[in-house]
Amino acid sequence: MLDKLKQLSEFFLIGVLAIIPIVVVIQVVLLTKRLIEDLFFSVYGSVDSYLFTFMIFAIVLVALSYIGYSIVQSRRSIIISTVDLLMAKIPLLNTVYRISKKVINMFSGSDSDGKKEVVYIEYPKDGLWVPAYVTNKSDDWYVLFVPTSPNPTSGFTVLVHQSKIIKSELNIEEVTSFIVSIGADFPKSEEIAKLPH
């Protein structure tokens, strides 16, 4: 009887772990739906007209699509360039805008200055290796963001000399997947052989 209860609890835990990715996707979809609904009713509450609200959403959809199209075609957008110029003139907001833009560009892969590298560093002590995002370089020094599992947006920033890093063949998406999955998804496991031990 005890063995059957133990086996049943194991099956239950395996089932729970198996549906976690599905639950996460459903939660993201529901959150997105809720945000869009809140935005829609917020606009509707201001104008009190479904037609006008739909027109505003259509204009926003066309504008965002045009911005995306112009960035893909010519690597820049007049709208974004204009906002960049305006933000540069506002003292406090320009810092927030510039930093958030750099972080988003790093994670989206749309940054064109080659700062999307992934490296390994020894942390928290010698012999333990962790992946890190290269966010900037200055001569032989690397500015790295070391993410923590399972949330890659939390972590810390360090300065590391080039001699103390090992370059990785992982891209941003692959290392992020590795961190979120707590190491279960490691697409280039042959890299482990390159790390000193």
Image (cartoon, rainbow, N blue to C red):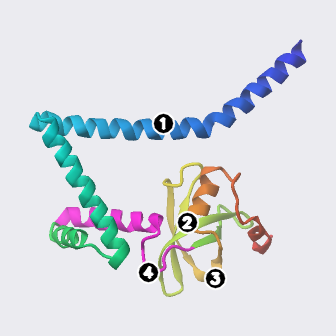
Label 4 vs 3, first from the N-terminus: 4
Q: Residue at x 43, y 78 (%)?
A: 112
- Residue 38, picture quadrant: top left
Q: Is residue 118 left or right of residue 195?
A: left
Q: Position of residue 55 (x, y in %)?
A: 17, 47
Label 3 vs 2, first from the N-terminus: 3
Label 4 vs 1, first from the N-terminus: 1
Q: Is residue 3 left or right of residue 22?
A: right
- Residue 49, picture quadrant: top left
Tell me if residue 106 is in the magenta stretch. Answer: yes
Q: Which tag is nearer the camera, tag 3 or tag 2?
A: 2
Residue range of the region highlighted in magenta in the rendering: 91-117
Q: In which quadrant is the N terminus drawn?
A: top right
Residue type at mark 2 is Ile
Element type at mark 2: helix
Look at the image and tell me whether residue 75 can be seen.
Answer: no
